[in-house]
Amino acid sequence: MKRSDINKALKEMEAFINEHKFALPPFCHFTPEEWLTKGSDYDEVRDNMLGWDITDYGLGDFDKVGFSLITIRNGNLAMKEKYAKTYAEKLLYLRQDQYAPLHFHWKKMEDIINRGGGNILIRVYNSTPDEQLDKINDVRINADGREQMVPAGTQVRLTPGESIAIPPFMYHDFTVEKGTGPVLLGEVSECNDDNIDNRFLESIGRFPEIEEDEPPYRLLCNEYPRN
């Protein structure tokens, strides 16, 4: 992705968050120049990859496959003695025509919450023992205190305020319901590690290759300098 496209996406998400009156922690507002002055007291942000994030899944078509997100808080499975948090929280922003591909997590249990905007459609499947799609068996879902069984491949519709729990090994993807507008999602989960805990149905990447055509507006969560 071009840095200019990343900057545009971050500013768009930031404006949508402000529109929905969700206040971000201070480190989300640091400029790249400010990060050069931040010492080891901000290592929790660096080590746990807090802050802004963009993914195009390495496919180079962000407008169709990808989304913007912020990790607000997170523990660290590899550094439990230093970081004791057992939980994480994110914000995700999907435009009208964006898609997040089918995947599951080996370790992480998560709740996906529609925080505002349009409606999100989350398709769900069980996984087979060899980690493929189970297209036959019904899927048990828990959504806002209600448990139910739905056919494999059902798109669960979440309007603002609604949520669904996604356990490990449940395949899921995201699309925005046509005509409802962009969506701000919340994610509350166990510790998150995108480097080792994402199983995509198709072999795709996670972080974009960046073409530096202009200075960064914000540093991404894998770009912080260490002082």
Image (cartoon, rainbow, N blue to C red):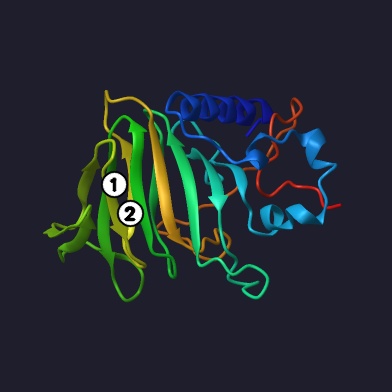
Q: In which quadrant of the rendered image does the N terminus lie?
A: top right
- Residue 213 location in percent, x, y? 74, 26
Numbered tag placed on residue 107 in the rendering: none
Disc 1 crowd rating (10 Å Cα; few below 14, some 14-19, many 20+) is: many
| Residue 84 horizontal side relative to residue 125, left or right | right
Residue displayed at 65% across by 39% down: 26
Q: Which residue is mark 1?
A: 122
- Residue 190 location in percent, x, y? 45, 64
Q: Is residue 54 visible?
A: yes
Q: Amino acid at mark 2?
A: His
Residue displayed at 56% across by 58% down: 74
Residue displayed at 41% across by 29% down: 95
Towards the viewer: 61 or 142:
142
Task: Please report contact status of discs 1 and 2: CB closer than 8 Å, yes or no.
Answer: yes
| Residue 84 horizontal side relative to residue 139, left or right | right
Disc 2 crowd rating (10 Å Cα; few below 14, some 14-19, many 20+) is: many
Q: Which residue is mark 2?
A: 172
> What whole-number distance in Å separates the C-alpha atoms at marks 1 and 2?
6 Å
The quadrant holding residue 75 is bottom right
Asked if 186 appears above or below 152 in the picture, the reply is: above
Local SS, label 1: strand
Upstream in sequence: badge 1 or badge 2: 1
